[in-house]
Amino acid sequence: MQGDHHGDHHIVIVDGLTVRHRHLVDVLKSARGISVHSRSLDELTGNKSDQDEDSLPVDVIVLLADATTPHQDIAATIRAAGLTQPLLVLSDETETHDDEADEIIRLPVQIGFLLGRIRAHISMYESSEEATLTLGAYVLRSGLRQLILPDGSAVKLTEKEMNILRFLHRANGQSVSREVLLAEIWGYNSQISTHTLETHIYRLRQKSEGGTEHMPLETPLLVTDAGGYRLVI
């Protein structure tokens, strides 16, 4: 299943119950690099970043508007639940607006165009100051390049350290091999050795789990598995 691939971005389609919703989910599932999920509004708004084992990473929310419920009301509910991820509304209406949506895309739409807009919004969001990811007891503020520790203090991360954490987050608690991390973070043609990765992991652990002399942190951020690493989420 595509959703099992490490590093996939998670796209949530709100209320995938109609034939049109199911068709959209099926078509998007064929794209590489994304994992597509269908959630009701209640499931989505109850899936805020927490430590529930059933929680689902959300990178982009896609709302397929219909005539029964105004998409403005649904979008407002999503934002009121604290979900700040990019929200794209797909609508048949020729003239529509939504203050809570990041973009309204007119239907019908070519899937290639939609995927391009989804990826563009992911890129913009990950570099924004409001972007946050919950990593177990930690919070990553991507735009500020900060990791908030369980005691509330913040440490500054390098670009590579931040990219490592974001990639591991998309694995949703599964172990990622050193080879995959090297390829994704440094590039498939890179000659960087595993020692470089291990050095970055070591520094991440120093920053995140070292605490202070008087108050060491006992909550791990990531652990080493056979041949790879995973987040404790």
Image: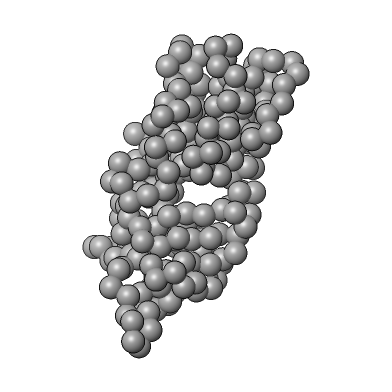
Residue at 58% over, 25% down: 73
Q: Is residue 157 left or right of residue 5?
A: right
Residue at 72% over, 21% down: 96
Against 153, residue 37 (above or below) is above
Q: Quadrant of the N terminus?
A: top left
Q: Nearer the viewer, residue 74 or 92?
A: 74
Q: Nearer the viewer, residue 172 or 4?
A: 172
**Can the viewer see residue 122?**
yes
Q: Is residue 61 left or right of residue 37?
A: right
Q: Nearer the viewer, residue 155 or 215?
A: 215
Against 165, residue 78 (above or below) is above
Residue 18 percent location from the top left of the image: 45, 13
Name the residue at the left extreme.
Answer: 226
Q: Quadrant of residue 35?
A: top left
Residue 84 percent location from the top left of the image: 56, 44
Q: Tell me, what colour scheme is on the image?
A: one colour
Residue 16 percent location from the top left of the image: 44, 21
Q: Quadrant of residue 26?
A: top left
Residue 165 percent location from the top left of the image: 44, 61
Q: Is residue 215 left or right of residue 119?
A: left
